Image: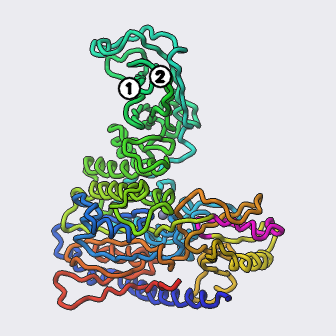
Amino acid sequence: MFHSQIFKYEFAKHLRIAAGLVTAIFALNSFGAAAGAAAPSASSAGPKKSRGYFISIDGMRPDYLETLVREGKLTAPRGLGWLYRNGFVAKKAWPVSTTLTAVSHVSTITCSLPSDHGIIANNFLSAGNLVSGFAEDIKSETLWQSARAEGRSVLSLAYVGTDGRTPARQVDFGVAYPDAKLIAPSQGFKWKMAELPAAAGWTLSTELNARLPADMREATVTFVLNPITKEEKQLQVLLFQSNADGPTANIEVYFNADKNLAAGALATLKKGAEDGEFGGLYFTETAPDSATRGFKRHVYLTVSDRQPGAVTVFASRPTYNLAQPASFREALDAQNLVWPDDGWRGDKTPLGPVRQVNVYNLHGKFLAEAARVARKLKIAADVTLFYQPVIDSVGHSYQALIPAPFSSANNDPYTQAIVRAFQNVDANVSTVLEDVSSTDVIALMGDHGMDPIKKVVNLAGLIPEQVNKIRVVTSGSLAMVYAQQDSTDADADEIARVLNTKRVDLKFEEQPVNGRVFRRSDFNTPGKPWQFGEAVWAFTADSGFYYMFNQTSREIFINASALGMHGNDNSVATMATGFLFKAPGIRKSEIDSMNLIDAVPTFTKHMGMRLPAQCRGRALEIKTIRSKLRSTTRSTIQPTKAR
Ligand SMILES: [Zn+2]
């Protein structure tokens, strides 16, 4: 079977998008009148201007959300469950195009297509160079830009795309993921009590003196604070073993800048107490040549093994807040609210054994606490963008291990991890919406779904003899084929055709690997824009697989390191996410499906804002309290459910 059917679908879909575009252009040309007329809740009578919240929950599966609401597990006062029970719900929200994080977020926030905004994958080639979809220029106007152009202030809590690194990616107040190059390396220290010198010269408080035994030992450690300036911080360490060697042995570790614990230790760690007990140390950078001079750095410390008579302390990579403006960063620093870094280990309530999951959980909580600090500073932004990464992280780590049907009553650790991740996000969203009022507008959605994974498919294994003649860039279940520097698109097109033939026939345990296929030469008619940039072909995988291109291996099926993945075509049933919405005057109601391209137009309509300039979406018609008729709930783009 050839893929003409697939292209028919693609073409039909874009025709519908083109229809949406006409509406969008009309709305823009007559923007003032259209926005006023279209927004029943806008402040024409206006004593109070609506504040808006545009929230993204990465990798949120709508079926899990619905189940947890039904089972009464999302109970935070202003969280996911509250929104679901009181607002408008689209049970399936289809990603605008490619179901990858960078693409989906940028497509949603610009309500335009990759062919418009240029972010075609999480990784892709631009002028032959591998670039990140999270950092590359966005060519369409974003919601934060259109809002600011209208004089509205924007707070972004790590919303994808607002990394603060270029003016186009800056907002009025923002926290972004810190630059990995500026985060210092992680360090570990292991001490055997018997080999350490006796503690000498310490000045301890009466209280500590009374509590600590005579046989205390000491050590020193040096933390690297900043890998660029190499600024270091030396600490004194006081250790003592509180009972005899054995499984219950408990070593307490105190850190301080000098041998004076009179004012209390900087951090205390107890081995043999609770799993993953940790302490934090905060330092302010002083190196004059530091780009982050004056920034507070944070080191987490955990005890990481339990050998009798010895203790291993793991220190995370000293990290910092990339927040703007400086006053906002300083306010976060002043409260010791410093970005938790990727090297961190341990948690009192970990979400399973994968460290990264727990790290993202901390990121999510940090962002909610940053919102609280913003409120304390009286930053009442007109538009707040909020991002939550942990549910996606749980999905990537455990999806294939989560039994179906999903229920919070399933006692396996993977179900419980995703339940806790949803509950944590529920609490974080509630923190952000703590002081929301009835005049405010809230839109909350995911960016894609999540599939359980069986195998990784190494496309290089299919064409070992021609592997060097093309470049293949993969992002999850998407693979894009490019010409090599010294070959032509026509050569690459031919090799990709051969690769595709082999790929289409490929099966694992009777299941075809093949998802969708897109060939650039088939997208040369107007109204049917090519969505994959400089690539000549693009493939997606069927549910259960994702791609890699390892030229050094001839193996085709490789064990997956990620047990959940996305990046499939946006019509794949498991790639849908959910959409929750609340605005003044709307009724609690529900529709079956919508497209995320309509999320921003729905938000701007109820905020009385203009659309981003290249927006192709259209506001959903949502029943209002005053409307007599059943309003239509038709989405601009009808998703095709056929696989
Ligand atoms: Zn994502």
SS state under label 1 = loop
User: Is 160 part of what is drawn in magenta?
Assistant: no
> Are circles 2 and 1 on residues that touch, CB within 8 Å?
yes
Quarter holding the N terminus is bottom right
The residue at 58%/36% (across/down) is 227
Q: Is residue 77 visible?
A: yes
Please state the horizontal and vertical placement of residue 636, each as a whole percent of the image: 41, 85
Q: Which residue is mark 1?
A: 266
Q: Which mark is residue 187?
A: none
The residue at 30%/50% (across/down) is 374
Which quarter of the picture shows residue 590? bottom left
Q: For this view, does 89 lie left or right of residue 252?
A: left
Amino acid type at circle 1 is Leu
Q: Which region is colored magenta?
A: 456-478
Rounded to the nearest angstrom, the CA distance separating label 2 from label 1 is: 10 Å
Q: Is residue 158 visible?
A: no
SS state under label 2 = strand
Which quarter of the picture shows residue 474? bottom right
Q: Is residue 19 above or below residue 342?
A: below
Q: For this view, does 64 lie left or right of residue 41?
A: right
Please state the horizontal and vertical placement of residue 622, each as a whole percent of the image: 27, 82
Q: For this view, does 41 lie left or right of residue 413?
A: left
Outermost residue toward the right in this view: 465
